[in-house]
Image (cartoon, grey):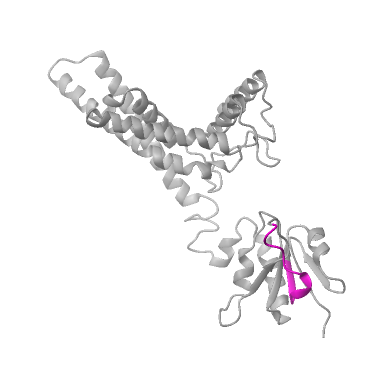
Amino acid sequence: MERHDPPSVLVNALRIGHTALDTPLAPVRAGTAEAIMAGARAIGVDPQDRAITFGRETFPVPSWYPDEDRVAFPLAGALALVGASLALARPARVSPAAAGALRGYATVVVAAVALHTAMIKWQPWGNRLLLYALVLAAPLAGLWLDSLFRRRLASESESASGSSSAPGRRRSVAAGLAVAMLAGSALAGVLALSYGFPRRLVGAGSVFTTSEWDTRFLRRPQWADEFRAAADAVRASGARRVGLVQQNDNWEYPWWLLLRDADGRPPELVALQSVLPDRPPADPGSTDAIVCTGTRKVCADLVPAGWTLTWRGYVGYALPPPG
């Protein structure tokens, strides 16, 4: 976050919450997103302000589908919100024997979420960054559900004795809704594990039918052959000290797998770029080969004169003249 004034933090929190609680209901997503953006403009905040929005991303984005990078958690999140709210407002009703400790714990959880929204810009894949808060809030939801069901059982006992009341009927409705949400959450979890992307259990790309190598490239299958072809050429050259050129979010791990010796010894990969003054980059001329990902121009600027640069889609490599 590059802005920390209350209106900006509020807008950032609302957008993070919208993405975390997204559902397959497109009209709901569109309507709530438009309300958030209209409210942001009303208080003088651009809802797409780069100072509170990561990179070039644009709010809103669908996040309900089971992709491990961004999947939302509306049911679990809603239960956690209710549990946290009641733990703060009425802790004795949730846990009479430990009301003070419960309120203190809920305060810590809420403070953590508040700090998160004040420090982390909204981003389409922000849900995975928020999972820790869901885990922390899960006990609050569990304690609230336990108290709800205990009161529901007490109401049934009252009904059996002929002393049914309006609060008891309301508890029955609340318990029914809670059960429905728990069942829906369990079903969503099963579907996410079975059909989620990219590591699903059944269907195309299943972890049971897809090789470990191909599983790494399910998001970018065309890159698998590009990495392998570049690595084969570098290994065939006999290079041991290999320069690495990449941008901040590029894929590096395949090089560590593909450039190993036959006996499994890892390569000597050295960075040819650095943003740390006390850790200067290696001299390209001190390497036996250079491997690159991302932008060809960035790579070409670092290749020594006389070397041959070969580029294929996302991946490239450079070798010195023979001899």
- Image quadrant for the C terminus? bottom right
Above or below, comparing residue 181 to residue 313 in the picture: above
Can residue 10 be seen at all in this image of the molecule?
Answer: yes
Can residue 20 be seen at all in this image of the molecule?
Answer: no
Quick one: which residue is furthest to the left in this view? 161
Quick one: which residue is furthest to the front in this view? 278
What is the x, y in percent for residue 264? 56, 79
Above or below, comparing residue 258 to residue 61 in the picture: below
| Range of magenta residues | 277-291
Question: Residue 240 vs residue 117: left or right?
Answer: right
What is the x, y in percent for residue 256? 61, 70
Q: For the point 75% across and 75% down, which residue is it?
A: 286
Q: Main secondary structure of the magenta part?
A: loop
What is the x, y in percent for residue 141? 35, 34
Above or below, comparing residue 39 to residue 235 in the picture: above
Q: For the point 55% across and 58% down, which residue is it?
A: 205
Question: Residue 58 vs residue 63: left or right?
Answer: right
Quick one: which residue is furthest to the bottom in this view? 323
- Image quadrant for the N terminus? top right
Q: For the point 82% across and 69% down, which residue is it?
A: 309
Looking at the rendered structure, the number of numbered marks drawn on it comes to 0
Residue 44, located in which quarter of the rendered image? top right
Nearest to the observer: residue 285 or residue 309: 285
Nearest to the observer: residue 264 or residue 215: 264
Q: Is residue 222 magenta-colored?
A: no
Nearest to the observer: residue 139 or residue 312: 139
What is the x, y in percent for residue 57? 68, 39
Residue 29, located in which quarter of the rendered image? top right
Q: For the point 68% across and 32% down, which residue is it?
A: 48
Residue 108, located in which quarter of the rendered image? top left
